[in-house]
Image (cartoon, grey):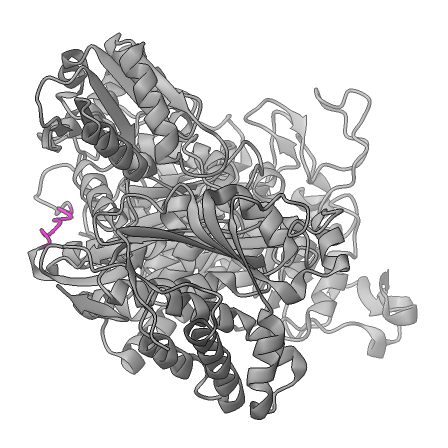
Amino acid sequence: MADTLALNKKDFTSDQEPRWCPGCGDYAILAAVQSFMPELGIQPENTVFVSGIGCSGRFTYYMDTYGFHGIHGRAPAIATGIATANPRLSVWVVTGDGDALSIGGNHLIHALRRNVNLKILLFNNQIYGLTKGQYSPTSEVGKVTKSTPFGSVDRPFDPVALALGAAATFVARTIDNDRKHLTDVLRQAAEHPGAAFVEIYQNCNVFNDGAFDLLRDKAQGAHNQIRLVHGEPIIFDEGTRCVRLGVNGRLEVAAVADTDPDTIITHDVHGPPSLAFTLAHLSQGPTEPTCIGVFREVERDAYGEAVHAQIAQATERLGEGELEKLLHGGDTWTV
Amino acid sequence: MTKTVEERDRVVVRFAGDSGDGMQLTGDRFTSATALLGNDLATLPDFPAEIRAPAGTVHGVSAFQIQFASTDVATPGDHADVLVAMNPAALKADLGAVARGGSLILNEDAFQQRNLEKAGYTVDPRTDGSLDGYQVYSVPMTSITVRAVEPVGVSKKEAERAKNMFALGLVSWMYGRPTEPTLEWLERKFGSKPEIFEANVAAFKAGFNFGETTELFAHPVEVKAAPAEPGIYRNVAGAQALAWGLIAASRVSGLPLFYASYPITPASDLLHELSRQKNFGVITVQAEDEIAAANMALGAAFTGQLAVTGTSGPGLDLKTETIGLAVITELPMIVVDVQRAGPSTGMPTKTEQADLLAAMFGRHGESPIPIVAASSPSECFEVALEAARVAVRYRTPVIVLSDTFLQNSSEPWRLPDVASIEPIDPMFAHPNGAVFQPYARDDHGARPWAIPGTPGLQHRIGGLEREDITGAISYDAENHERMTDLRREKVQGIAASLPPLEVDDPAGDAELLVLGWGSTAGSIRAAVGRARDAGEQIARAHLRWLNPLPTNTGEVLGRYPKVLIPEINEGQLALLLRAKFLVDARSFSRVQGRPIWADELDDAIAEALRG
């Protein structure tokens, strides 16, 4: 058993060799997670990684924690069982855009609604990788893939907006290759007492290379990442652009120079979800300036704790259940 | 006026009315009073899927049947001796359930033109001769009830609602049921609403007195207490017994009970019952769907809980992929399938046994699973315990097959001695310094159950094929075949721990074996008993474990020249046994959404003996 103080990356690294494609964004996320887990002070044996199907699903095998590689879309449900049965565990869900938003959409929204104490990392690469390149529920309209040779015609989900709509108590977005931002967001997610949803823009260099270049690329990102910081005015593009209040309460991107400073939005993660929701919809996708960071963070009772509190209350009120009494309750007769 | 008393061995009473008429409640109370008298009994609630179908229509008829006797009762009775029909629709729907010559007690007030039309009668059946051959008693139940309740001062609507208590009072008089249990129950239920309580008491007493004082009924009937083994008894329905069996398993294993389920008829009663038992440490989760419920249970199993998911046919379909995951991850999990009638939505409130092959084979790949089925409401308790014992010992999902009939019907149950229930040892894995091998096996073929929180035993499981012993992902051809064999052998190996199939063959040289499984046990027992009384030599056996089968199953089948297998499906067990043992087992099949009647089996047995 590793000592808390002595925990390091190795304690969270399994003996399995990662088998993603060379250059896949998943490597960077894995390295970041393995590196920052020791800082959380949670022992590997008290940590469970749960995943579904897709490239992201392999993540569990590379963490030297307890792990459950489930079936397609069901990771949030398996994880709900784990976290509800044993609220002392630190439970992480690793999923992808197809896994979480298509086949498993129902479990995702209900895990968020219940506020199960899960850290849900959604690797969004806007493509089906493991099945070799079909469009996904986050692919942009018109996406040409093997299954949509004439372009997709259906509108994508915005994962952040979806999570906010499901009343998630912690919603954030980060980027696979920005180690510092990624680690910082994951740390906040880990510390959040309840369901934490983190969308990670992840580059699939084989089937959808460059989808997030506008934000991932260092030079372009400097202009297009709208970094959200609680309590700070939302200003980006090296201080030249901002998010300001427009007509009818709408938010709009504008040049700082043309803007009355009083109309620049100050980010607030604790307020009503409407601000976060509007920020989520500020861009149509990662092809224009897009918000990253924590959108919303509020506290609400976590599901597992509430379940166990109810059991404790019932036990206090009714006394510890006795099988003999249960069977003999009601009308009995003796022969 | 004193009336003489007629003594009878057994009586079948059926209460039928609109689903809003409170017939299930009436039946329940009659059952309680009957149980307290010491009669043996069996009940069959029979209700529509619609919560409140249009009043007065045949679709909305809800019925409750009880057979009680001074001797052993095996079934709720093929045909009712008495039908209480609260309206024309109830008569129309249930006349076929009444024995010729039986009594019909009709609520005269409801037999008006409009109600007759709603029931689909063009002519009042009381006047056109269609009830010739029955003893018809027209009793103005509603109006007498309203008059009796008048002094209490409740609204006319509330007064009319009490007419089911009138019917209960009347039938209680007819069969000499004690009134105290019903009066006490009314007090418990309505004690806080004095007016409603008094109205129901007035209606109940009016019914009882109506029987006592009118000339309408010749005399009350007495059914003496049935001889029974000494012990403390209670009446129990299958849903309760199954829920309590799971709680018992949790207690004797020390594993907290985790039950995840999605509301579905008729399995919801399990969720309801377990949700009430929080002070037993039971976690119940009403999941977002059937698939989630199964996966939550599997997640809980991973953490070391006694994990159960319950459902009915359509839900079993949805859980299929997860059950496969439980097979390959080799985690203990119990899946309860309360079978209902038909494919798809079918007939949700009606019974059937047609999920056996789905339980057996309804998954892709080779994915063997132990299957156990209860044969009576009270047996659900033991079956739940056995399922838990096998699931935990062998680290495997287990399917428990119940059905609508078992779930809802009730019978007297001699309460088990709680202290004598054998403990279940979870045998969790503990670190021993060696490298942990999650797929190493013990002498039962079971792998270690290493739960999160245990230092040093971190490991990863999942749906991908595992390497033998190490549990690493493996695509190796030989390994896959070995793992397939190991999973099969493990499940087959359970048979060694099961009692042999017991055959009831008093003469020892019967020509015909009647073999059943599940809820047909009562009907088979009754029919075989009658055939024996008529001088036939017939053997009878009933399977509790359908997979694996008891080790002597083939030998038993081979012993009899003729084998008859009655099932509420189109011959699923017969198909399995024919395939496995090459026996010429004959199937008797009924799929009418109800139990097989014993008298249908009389004919089938006679034919099998001849043929």
Residue A75 locus on image (x, y percent): 46, 44
> Above or below — where is B524 with respect to B89?
above
Residue B165 locus on image (x, y percent): 49, 72
> Above or below — where is B424 with respect to B553?
below
Seen at 70% across and 52% down, the residue is B124
Residue B87 locus on image (x, y percent): 62, 59
- Quadrant for residue A136, please give it: top right
B196 left or right, relative to B235:
right
Which residue is at the front of the view, B11 or B523? B11
Query: What stretch of residues is rendered in magenta?
Result: B421-428
B338 left or right, relative to B386:
right
B575 left or right, relative to A111:
left
Seen at 42% across and 36% down, the residue is B322
Which residue is at the front of the view, B123 or B545? B123
Asked whether the viewer can see residue A81, the reply is no
- Quadrant for residue B572, please give it: top left
Asked whether the viewer can see residue B390, the reply is yes
Q: Is residue B16 magenta?
A: no
Residue B386 locus on image (x, y percent): 20, 43
Which residue is at the front of the view, B169 or A281? B169
Q: Is residue B422 magenta?
A: yes
Seen at 47% across and 53% down, the residue is B103
Q: Magenta span: helix, strand or loop, mainly?
A: loop
From the image, which quarter does the C terminus of chain A lie in?
A: bottom left
A169 left or right, relative to A320:
right
